[in-house]
Image: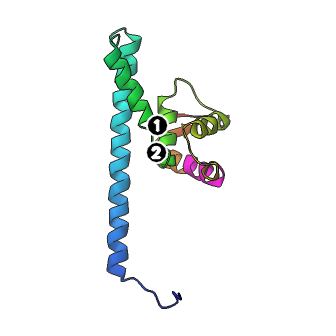
Amino acid sequence: MKLDNLTLPPALIERYKREKARLQQDIEEAQRKLMAVNQVLMAAKVLGAAESDEEVETETEAKQAVDPSNVMGTMATLINESPKPLTKAELKAKLKAIGVPDERLGTYFYVAIKRLKDHERIKVLEDGRVWKQ
């Protein structure tokens, strides 16, 4: 099958670009909300208010909701939920443990760190560790 003459209308391409941007915004907003919920649950646990099994299970389910196919979002979630700054090696180990494919932990990993930093979702400390914004 030869695809030399295949073209897509510019209007269709533009429509998909807008849809992609909208979906990325939806994902980022959902991740921000999830992080806020997790922070409240962690605070409740620290303050002794989350003693029931149901509340502890809810926190566990929220952490398991991390999607390894969304590497950048998963990275932001792990970094922002960490109680201390993470080295890149620690972050890679956490990502690998939740099922992120090895090929996403190479060059893409560093591109994702830069993009998250540029979008002010995380900060990179002077020593190279990453932490919550």
Residue position marked by numbered label 1 in the rendering: 77
Q: Residue at x 35, y 15 (%)?
A: 53
- Which disc is residue 9 wearing? none
Q: Looking at numbered disc 1 in the image, what kind of residue is underneath it?
A: Thr
Between 105 and 2, the one lying in front of the other is 2
The magenta region covers: 105-114
- To which quarter of the image does residue 123 belong? top right
Q: Residues within 10 Å of mark 2 (few under 14, many from 20)?
A: many
- Which disc is residue 73 wearing? 2
Q: Residue at x 48, y 40 (%)?
A: 76
Q: Is residue 58 magenta?
A: no
Q: Residues within 10 Å of mark 1 (few under 14, many from 20)?
A: many
Q: Position of residue 72 (x, y in %)?
A: 50, 47
- Quote the CA–CA distance across marks 1 and 2: 6 Å
For the stretch drawn in magenta, the main secondary structure is: helix
Q: Residue at x 35, y 73 (%)?
A: 14
Residue at the bottom extreme, as displayed = 5
Total numbered labels placed on residues in the image: 2
116 shown above or below 43: below
Q: Mark 2 and mark 1 in contact (Cβ < 8 Å)? A: yes
Query: SS for tag 2?
Result: helix
